[in-house]
Image (cartoon, helix red, strand yellow):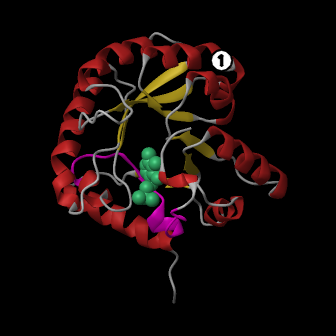
Amino acid sequence: MKTHPLDDISRLLDNAASAAGRPPPRLLAVSKTQPAGAVAGLVVLGQRAFGENYVQEAAAKIAELEQAEPGMPSLEWHLIGHLQSNKAREATALFDWVQTVDRAKLVAALARHRDPERGPLNVLVQVNIDDEASKHGCRPDEVEGLAAAIAGEPLLRLRGLMVIPTPHDDPELGRPAFRRSRALFDALRERYPQVDTLSMGMSSDAAIAIAEGATMVRIGTALFGARNLSSKGTSSGA
Ligand SMILES: *Cc1c(COP(=O)(O)O)cnc(C)c1O
């Protein structure tokens, strides 16, 4: 019998976690560039958490799902692309989690715009763990200040850290960056007991990320197939 990629991924995550003696991580299905129908296809199989890189694309997809699929279970939407402060209002209305908080200005904008009726927005501090000049994310030594700012906002809930390490042809070369991320995460968790999420690992390196302590992996290609390379989904901004 043919298995769905979701079954294969779930098994891979379970195996990697049990080999490391850890609980299985949460699976975030990265649905950027995928049509609403592809999301609906995973929802039928029980998947609830989805990641999008762009505010506009997410808005259209969420609206389409709500219209086309009445009676859908409620989904959990995560923003995993760079967020401009001028889109913070729209992001707080669409998303349950923002994983890319990397500066104080964005903390303030998200806190100001979150509708109290929706409850606190879950946020992760994105860390530029490989210190790449071209990348988003704060420096490791900025995590503490950002965490304190987030923890001081009643409409934001600090849940942990997110990293996108430099990709390598040999995923094993990414292990040190995952290990450094885990150390930062452990330090943060000592100070803030509500911190429970370390978001790291993608299709090519999820097993190594899990071995190093990921509690959430973000999987696109391995679930949905390759994205169209000419589409905007290959970059990562909102
Ligand atoms: C696209 C993307 C992913 C998923 O990558 P795959 O290699 O397709 O699994 C994960 N995280 C972020 C931030 C992304 O932009």
The boundaries of the magenta stretch are 211-229
Q: Secondary structure at mark 1?
A: helix
Q: Is residue 228 magenta?
A: yes
Pick the quarter of the image with the C terminus: top right
Residue depicted at x 21% and y 48%:
212
| Image quarter of residue 97 | top right
The picture places residue 80, in percent across and down from the top left corner, at 49, 41
Closer-to-camera residue (236/174): 236
x and y, in percent, of residue 107 in the image? 49, 17
| Residue nearest the viewer, comparing 76 with 129 | 129
Question: Where, by quadrant of the figure, is residue 84 drawn?
Answer: top right
Dot 1: few (<14), some (14–19), or many (≥20) neighbours within 10 Å?
A: some
* Between 149 and 237, the one nearer to me in the picture: 237
Residue 192 in percent (x, y) is at 34, 20
- Residue drawn at point x = 48 percent, y = 59 percent: 220
Q: Is residue 34 visible?
A: yes
48 shown above or below 183:
below
Q: Is residue 141 left or right of residue 94?
A: left
> Is residue 27 at least partly visible in the picture?
no
Residue 146 part of the magenta segment: no
Q: Amino acid at mark 1?
A: His
Left or right side of 203 for 49? right
Considering every residue shown, the one lying at the far bottom of the view is 1
User: Which residue does the image show at 68% across and 61% down from the upper left?
Assistant: 40
User: What residue is pinned by disc 1?
Assistant: 113
